[in-house]
Image (cartoon, coloured by chain):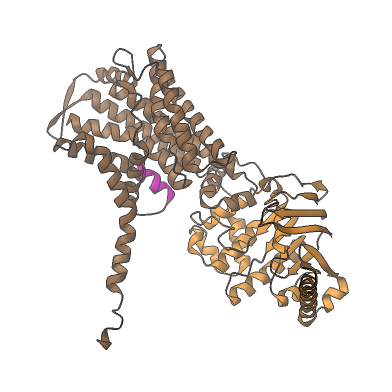
Amino acid sequence: MSLLLGAFIIGLILALVALGVFISFRVYHFPDMTAEGSITLGAAVAAALLVTGHSPMYATMAAAVAGAVAGLITGVLHTRFKINALLSGIIVMTALYSVNLHVMGKSNVPLMTVTTFADQAAGIAAHFGPEKVLLFGREASVRDLTLLGLSLGLVALVGVLLYAFFRTHLGLAMRATGDNDQMVRALGSSDGVLLTGGLALSNALVAMAGALLAQYQGFADAQMGIGMLVWGLASVIIGEALVGTNRFGYLLAGAVFGSILFRLLVAVALRWGLDPNDLKLITAVFVFAALVLPGSFAKLRRRISAPVSGGSRA
Amino acid sequence: MLEINGIRKTFHAGTANEVRSLQGVNLQIAPGSFVVVIGTNGSGKSTLLNAVAGTFLVDEGSINIGGEEVTQWAEHRRAQHIGRVFQNPFSGTAPTLSVAENLALASRRGQTRGLGFALAGANRDRMVGAIQGLGMGLETRLDNAIGSLSGGQRQALTLLMATWLKPKLLLLDEHPAALDPRSADQVVRITDRIIARDSLTAMMVTHSMQQAVTYGDRLVMMHRGQIIHDVSGAEKRRLRVEDLLARFEEVRRADLLDTSAADLLRARYI
């Protein structure tokens, strides 16, 4: 049960990564490698602040701001200096690796001795009385359930805020930028500024996920960002398959569901004896298949249903 | 309303691909005038429109819209004065957004876009009314993604968006050219109606001689980056397709003369 709850909680935290990747990759069609650096940046900033005695809330918010700055820099590299989208992200990601080491002071910062949001959740849980309750006939720790509730509330809040934001004049212009930048310019808005703002928003979410993840697992690590972009993309793709529509609100919700489902699948696979070292390989193959297979199936279907040409002559 | 003074633009200057697109264009357009721009391929007519819209900055000369010098303004800044419809029906609308959302974007052309809800309140009635005015039966499809509509429908909506806030200048770059004949005809008629109704100042680039003689109160013909004919008033009204074809033939002969003269000189001196 605790394994399941853990998977749910991590899935919810990483849903923020999925939402960030959804914004950069699906709204803007911008493969933003910055995410790999900004999730670690979020963890590093939060860890550094927690260690010096700041509150978890403050540390998490500061992490989000740091992520926004990282996204901003990528946006400026791409729009002002005309550097290729992929390369802008890689440049910032590479730079962030050193920045993160400086922020943390070493490559791994344990957070076992400081108060994190997970500890605060445990504090709340203590008010409920029992340490364990029965859930579906199994024992579940109240601390984990409280954490789950808090993460769920947070992700739901972020999701609703994002949904509302993308229906405002500004948010709509951002979506239009990914759709048709020529039109956005013709309607009097700078597509460069709108893209940069979107990348800042995306990376703020990713860094926030990094801050929460570090607090949940009890440490921040310089390597924790590796593979996160593909991870987020896998969640987004699963989410799209789950909701099966192109309506914007559904796609946002889908990214969250996709992240949770993907994490659950991974937890189950690990339980069944999957070598954790193979995890990133399998994720990569999965994303490849998800990107390519729908097209191949359509081609195959056309070939099967197409009339056989020249058959009568034989 | 529009004042163009001696603008020049050379693309890929100093390379083998150098193209002198605009070679000293002067043009004054009075408020409320509807100017048709024609010319051979590569004559610079679309480039002229893009120069005014700010797609690129000109090398020399100045551009003035409604008394404001905009020569150094970026494309998106000029859009506060300019409405545009492009040749490609996909260029003017955002396909994954709904019809209403596209119109909402257009309702803020050149203004700040804040955190107010884009589809809030009274705007919707005006949207339905304006779309009914197109006569395409789109008023029931306000919440459909624009990508699901036909090219003609998208072009008509682009026109509506470009003129939603009255622009000081409307730029039409062969906007019916990519449509089937029936839709093209419909879009041109809607264009003419909107321009007349709002007494807009407009420039329309076209390949169709028929459109060039039927619409507008002034006709400008371009060749090799310069304006070579400028017809307005009674003379424009009398203009027939044959007259235009004769003008094009003249231009072609002059070009032939140029090349044959060049060959003659080359044969003699090289």
As drawn, the residue found furthest toward the right would be B234
B97 relative position to B166: left or right: left
Indicate the position of residue A263 as horizontal and vertical percent values. Answer: 26, 38
Is B210 colored magenta in this rendering? no
A199 relative position to A101: left or right: right
Q: Which chain is depicted orange? A: B
Instruction: Answer above or below: position of A236 versus A54.
Output: below
Q: In the picture, residue A189 is in which quadrant? A: top right
B83 relative position to A263: left or right: right
Q: In the picture, residue A278 is in which quadrant? A: top left
Instruction: Answer above or below: position of B222 versus B256.
Output: above
Q: Nearer the viewer, residue A291 or B78?
A: A291
Q: Nearer the viewer, residue A190 or B161?
A: A190
Asked if one can make out residue A177 in the rendered structure from this viewpoint, the answer is yes
Indicate the position of residue B74 as horizontal and vertical percent values. Answer: 69, 45
Quarter the C terminus of chain A occupies: bottom left
Q: Main secondary structure of the magenta part?
A: helix
Indicate the position of residue A287 as horizontal and vertical percent values. Answer: 31, 47
Asked if one can make out residue A202 in the rendered structure from this viewpoint, the answer is no
Instruction: Answer above or below: position of B269 versus A252.
Output: below
Is A254 colored magenta in this rendering? yes
Quarter the N terminus of chain A occupies: top left
For the point 29% across and 32% down, the residue is A10
Q: Which residues are magenta?
A: A248-255
Q: Nearer the viewer, residue A49 or B128?
A: A49
Q: Which chain is depicted brown? A: A
Q: How many marks?
A: 0
For the point 60% across and 64% down, the residue is B155
